[in-house]
Image (cartoon, rainbow, N blue to C red):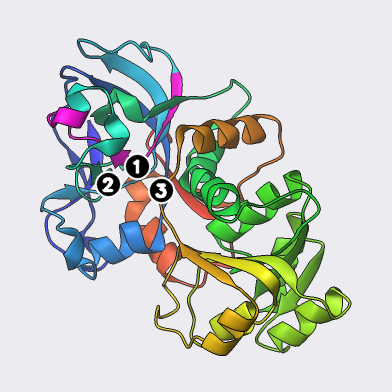
Amino acid sequence: MKAAIYREFGSPDVLGYEDIDDPIAGPGEIVVEVHAVTVNRVLDCAVRAGEQTQRGVVLPHIGGVDPAGIVRDVGIGVSNVSAGDRVALLSRAPCLDCEHCAAGDFKKCSKSTMLGVGRWGGAAELVKVPASVAVKLPGNLEFAEAAAVLRHGPMAHHLLFDTGNLQPGQTVLVMGAAGGLGLTGIQIAKAAGATVIAAAGSDERVAVGCEYGADFGVNYAKQDLTEAVRGYMGGEGIDLVFENISNPKTWPKALKCLRKLGTLVTAGAHGGGKVELDCAFLYHQNIRIFGSTGNTDKNVSDTVSLAGEGKLKAKIEKVFPLSEAPAAHRMMEGDVLAGKIILDPTAG
């Protein structure tokens, strides 16, 4: 098979387009013919550049954390999918060797690794994974769309509902509104009956958030975020902040948008990660702050259902053939306004 493989860390030019041996499905495993996989700024580009050494990537390496495609082969003991099924692959892969995996409780695997980071991923014509990470797709959901929405949809559901307890009729501020997680959060919150405010650092990015369903928009590079949000709400605070930036300039402003008993949920730190916390506001207003990652099976199925109904869409910036992986990485490292970059190993 062909793969976008690198044998040293560095610029996008270290990505080779090489022939390597086809993977073979072992017990509990499947081999998937990849039709789409996203390129992510951190999990692909920063890892390839050698900026994520804490993740323990072993060279040579093939990235690609969220492939989608067609099951080509199944190993012994696999019953949840069959050859020919259209699937997307979740990124957290169990080891299949520990006591939890032996009991079929893959979510509790103590040795799980991330596809495309801790093990070879989907930037290749074929990828081998534990069958438990496969999610069957409805026939109307394209592979590129599936790869993109399954990257962020389950986590967004988890943050909004399991962590943030979002209810119909509530108000939500989505930070980083034009990013993958932000756009996903906007659509899921709207589908749940919430009023949504999209916040981003440029007029263009705010416009993207509004295009995908937000009721109001705030450019926090031009406006005072707290004043603008409370202005939209008639001076009142909002119920929930959906935060995935952790920028020291915007995080305190987002927190102050909350009403009494409001909640802030966060799952990102690419804006710096260390922020100021006004503890007086925190305890006087009985604010709840939760950081959380991961997802549940229900979060996954809800994402697939919403996407299948056309209520959750991905913004696809560009699709590259696998042979042009270096160009795809360079584009992601540049100034991408919004949306996902996709590699398609089946493209010419």
Q: Quadrant of the C terminus?
A: top left
User: Residue 284: x and y, percent?
Assistant: 63, 83
Residue at 60% from the left image edge and 73% from the top image edge: 287
Residue at 50% from the left image edge and 85% from the top image edge: 277
Sequence order check, earlier mark of 2 and 3: 2
Q: As drawn, is 61 to the left or to the right of 168?
A: left
Give the CA distance from mark 1 to mark 2. Answer: 8 Å
Check residue 116 in the rendering and tell me which mark sits there, or answer none. 2
Which residue ends up furthest to the right in the rendered image?
234
Please rate how many residues cluster around mark 3, counting C-alpha atoms within 10 Å: few if below 14, some from 14 to 19, many from 20.
Answer: few
Sequence order check, earlier mark of 1 and 3: 1
Can residue 339 be seen? no
Q: As drawn, is 312 to the left or to the right of 301?
A: right
Q: Which residue is label 3 attached to?
A: 294
Going by the numbered disc 3, the residue's amino acid type is: Gly
Q: Quadrant of the N terminus?
A: top left
Going by the numbered disc 2, the residue's amino acid type is: Gly
Tell me the magenta residue range.
Answer: 86-100
Q: Secondary structure at mark 2?
A: loop
Residue at 26% from the left image edge and 30% from the top image edge: 129
Q: Which residue is label 1 attached to?
A: 91
Please rate how many residues cluster around mark 1, counting C-alpha atoms within 10 Å: few if below 14, some from 14 to 19, many from 20.
Answer: many
Check residue 120 in the rendering and tell me which mark sits there, or answer none. none
Q: Is residue 98 magenta?
A: yes
Sequence order check, earlier mark of 1 and 2: 1
Q: Is residue 176 above or below residue 84?
A: below
